């Protein structure tokens, strides 16, 4: 290669690698949040957790390599254009066609890497992830069932154990309720229980020893059986939960497997268009590297000076233009409008033609930037003038200048990060459209309801990037040196940034107290519906199990807190220590008639019955007692509203109230306490990020925006991992909940203060 080729490639590698890091990190946030905290809480060894996260990286790289290539070209050539190096190249006779040589080489290498991942890396890593996850969770499966805590992860089964032996081998004193459809309802009392997992067959059984099984038929008659040892087969996914992407879907299959699956469906007379679309996508997506290469060169090599961040946003727009038709094409195939091969190759054809036309036009007018129509530019210039005239008079010129630069970068960073989240979400949900489990309206609603959560997590990272890039840009342009020469210290310069960080923290806090929880609950309902799963009410008070103040257990189908009314309530009464079930009482309706809802009182019970059991577990003779309308003594009315809610779906104030009530009733609430403390600590992350960014940005020197983005992503990654680790430790009761929530802020805050106080101001 000639010197110019090596130079151009070096200029492209930095933004390409940085884009790869940014995109992959943001797409990996969901697996980190979904699995890392849970695995740490289960005391899985850190090397195993790290290896599991590494196995998920190819799934992200399959999409992020072409995206990073485009962004790398736009940012790299944008920097060359901003520094007038592209002008020097043209003056030396180097045309756009000549630059196709280094761009083509980088695009070819990206194509080879993407093709390898789609053909081999993605399927193999996914299969390894599933095997390791099954092995790890199988070893810890019994540990998920804790003493005196209702385990209801298995659909239509409830496990409640009295104790776990010190050896950790199984459980002692097992009570299990079985309401699976297609068979009579049954309850089990067992001396000992354990989980048996066959990794080869991937089956999971619950093994019960010295068991008494009571089965209730449709006529209300009991069948009692004493069984020395019995097994209950359950859904493996309920005990060993792995993400849906870890099971082999169409993208995870190799080409031979896809062809075999297509042939099998065709032999059954079924449509195989999904399999053929997936086959063509394995070829079409890597080929997009060539398309993105031409587009990146045509759009990046100009004389504009809008900087790297503007090129980053432009790249996201092109990525949207590619991936949206790529994942909507199968809908047209499903309607027999286009063939499968065209659905996969249509984005390449359309964008390829656009890239060729743009390249030819740019070759003729390389010194002309792409401009908006004159009328639109005039409109924007008038609005900008109005905004400048309305600037706050209390701000000095320097404050307005720094705040203006900071806010522009903040908005661009937030828009870029939101774009990445939307792209990854669209890619994750788009396959539901052509599978027929989702409609375009459902997808739009899902985006609407999940947006507050994205904003909630994007704001801190955008604040970090805005501070780093703003100070790096001021340093690169020698403006920081001029400010220091005029007596303006780094502390004074950062005042507008800290004010913006405080406003950002307030925004996060308000979102948390208002829309984040309820909107995320609606988004989860839509996600379940698009996955084809039942959308049962997510409100935990709609049904539940409750432990009484003694060893009694209560199950109810519905509790109405306003009327203090239970529907479909069953009471199980045990001997001391839960060694034997002595009585079972059922009532279709029970209404509290006591004096105070929070005091033990009387319930008016109708349409029910009661049965007693002897020492052998059999129903006593003549023990059946019908209940028509009488008074029974249950737990206080408010006791049945203490079911643990999902913290993700709760407003902060509601979660606080529920957590306080549960603690007062003696429940294990470490995870919820950590959630409450985290939601108070998280808004302060904007101030911590600003404290960190100011001294780091100065040490970056003249590296500019790209160096700022690189440092920002590295800091965010370390910070996010620390949050997950401390949250898992707090949820497991290993450290105090408040310490688990505030430890990342304290550690990073102390380091930031040290750097801020020692940096040259």
Image (cartoon, grey):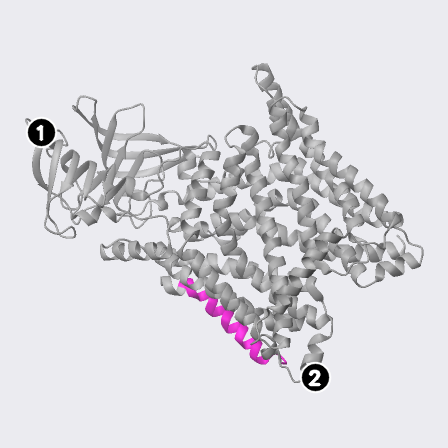
The vertical placement of 753 against 307, above or below, is below
Q: Is 450 rendered above or below residue 470?
A: above
> Quarter-wise, where is residue 120 in the image?
top right
In the rendered image, which quarter contains the C terminus? bottom right
Identify the residue at image location x=47%, y=45%. 449
Q: Which residue is mark 2?
A: 485
Residue 749 shows up from this direction: yes
Seen in the picture, residue 670 relative to 136 is either above or below; the reply is below
Q: Quadrant of residue 428?
A: top right
Identify the residue under disc 1: 626
The residue sitting at 36% across, 43% down in the picture is 142
Q: Is residue 154 magenta?
A: no
Magenta stretch? 740-761
The kind of secondary structure the magenta stretch mainly shows is helix
Report x, y in % for residue 44.
Answer: 45, 51
At which x and y percent is residue 162? 24, 45
| Element type at mark 2 | helix
For marks 1 and 2, the one nearer the N-term is: 2
Across and down, in percent, residue 720 comes to 52, 58
Residue 556 image-quadrant placement? top left
């Amino acid at each position: 290669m000639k010197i110019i080729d090596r130079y151009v490639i070096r200029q492209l590698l930095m933004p390409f690698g940085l884009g790869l890091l940014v995109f992959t990190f943001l797409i990996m946030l969901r697996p980190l949040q979904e699995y890392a905290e849970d695995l740490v809480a289960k005391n899985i060894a850190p090397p195993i957790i790290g290896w599991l996260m590494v196995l998920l990286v190819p799934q992200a790289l399959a999409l992020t390599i072409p995206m990073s290539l485009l962004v790398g070209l736009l940012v790299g050539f944008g920097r060359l254009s901003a520094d007038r190096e592209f002008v020097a190249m043209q003056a030396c006779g180097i045309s756009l066609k000549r630059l196709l040589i280094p761009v083509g080489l980088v695009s070819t290498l990206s194509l080879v890497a993407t093709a390898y991942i789609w053909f081999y890396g993605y399927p193999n890593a996914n299969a390894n992830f599933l095997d390791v996850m099954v092995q790890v969770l199988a070893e810890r499966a019994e540990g998920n069932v804790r003493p005196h805590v209702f385990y209801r992860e298995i659909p239509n089964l409830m496990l409640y154990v009295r104790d776990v032996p010190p050896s950790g081998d199984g459980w002692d004193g097992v009570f299990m309720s079985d309401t699976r459809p297609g068979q009579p309802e049954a309850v089990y009392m067992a001396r000992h229980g354990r989980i048996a997992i066959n990794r080869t067959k991937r089956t999971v059984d619950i093994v019960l020893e010295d068991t008494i099984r009571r089965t209730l038929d449709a006529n209300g008659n009991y069948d009692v059986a004493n069984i020395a040892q019995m097994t209950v087969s359950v859904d493996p996914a309920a005990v060993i939960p792995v993400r849906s992407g870890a099971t082999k879907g169409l993208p995870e299959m190799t080409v031979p497997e896809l062809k075999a699956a297509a042939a099998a469906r065709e032999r059954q007379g079924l449509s195989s268009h999904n399999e053929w679309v997936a086959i063509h996508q394995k070829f079409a997506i890597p080929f997009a590297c060539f398309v993105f290469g031409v587009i990146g060169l045509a759009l990046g090599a100009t004389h504009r000076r809008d900087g790297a961040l503007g090129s980053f946003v432009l790249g996201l727009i092109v990525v949207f233009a590619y991936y949206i038709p790529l994942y909507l094409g199968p809908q047209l195939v499903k309607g027999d409008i286009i063939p499968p091969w065209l659905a996969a190759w249509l984005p390449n054809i359309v964008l390829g033609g656009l890239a060729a036309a743009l390249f030819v036009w740019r070759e003729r007018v390389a010194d002309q930037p792409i401009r908006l129509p004159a009328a639109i530019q005039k409109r924007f210039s008038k609005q900008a003038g109005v905004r400048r005239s309305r600037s706050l008079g209390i701000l000095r010129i320097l404050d307005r200048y720094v705040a203006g630069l900071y806010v522009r970068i903040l908005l661009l960073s937030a828009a870029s990060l939101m774009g990445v989240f939307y792209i990854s979400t669209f890619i994750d949900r788009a396959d539901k459209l052509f599978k027929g489990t989702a409609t375009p309206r459902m997808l739009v609603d899902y985006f609407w309801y999940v947006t507050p959560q994205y904003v909630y997590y994007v704001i801190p990272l955008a604040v970090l990037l805005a501070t780093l890039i703003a100070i790096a840009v001021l340093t690169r342009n020698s403006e920081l040196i001029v400010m220091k020469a005029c007596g303006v210290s780094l502390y004074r310069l950062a005042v507008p940034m800290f004010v913006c960080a405080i406003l950002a923290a307030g925004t996060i806090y308000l979102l948390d107290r208002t829309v984040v929880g309820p909107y995320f609950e609606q988004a989860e309902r839509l996600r379940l519906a698009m996955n084809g799963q039942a959308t049962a009410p997510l409100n935990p008070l709609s049904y539940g199990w409750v432990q009484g103040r003694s060893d009694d257990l209560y199950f109810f189908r519905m509790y109405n807190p306003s009327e203090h009314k239970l529907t479909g309530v069953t009471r199980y009464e045990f001997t001391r220590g839960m060694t034997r079930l002595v009585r079972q009482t059922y009532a279709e309706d029970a209404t509290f008639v006591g004096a105070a809802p929070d005091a033990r009182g009387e319930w008016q019970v109708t349409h029910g019955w009661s049965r007693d059991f002897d020492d052998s577990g059999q129903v006593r003779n003549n023990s059946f007692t019908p209940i028509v309308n009488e008074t029974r003594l249950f737990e206080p009315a408010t006791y049945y509203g203490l079911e643990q809610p999902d913290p993700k779906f709760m407003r902060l104030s509601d979660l606080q109230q529920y957590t306080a009530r549960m603690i007062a009733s003696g429940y294990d609430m470490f995870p919820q306490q950590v959630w409450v403390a985290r939601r108070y600590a998280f808004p302060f992350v904007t101030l911590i990020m600003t404290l960190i960014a100011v001294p780091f940005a100065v040490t970056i020197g003249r590296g500019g925006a790209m160096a700022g983005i690189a440092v920002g992503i590295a800091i965010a990654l370390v910070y996010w991992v620390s949050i997950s680790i401390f949250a898992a430790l707090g949820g497991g009761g290993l450290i105090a909940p408040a310490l688990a929530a505030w430890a990342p802020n304290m550690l990073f805050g102390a380091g930031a203060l040290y750097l801020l106080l020692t940096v040259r101001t």
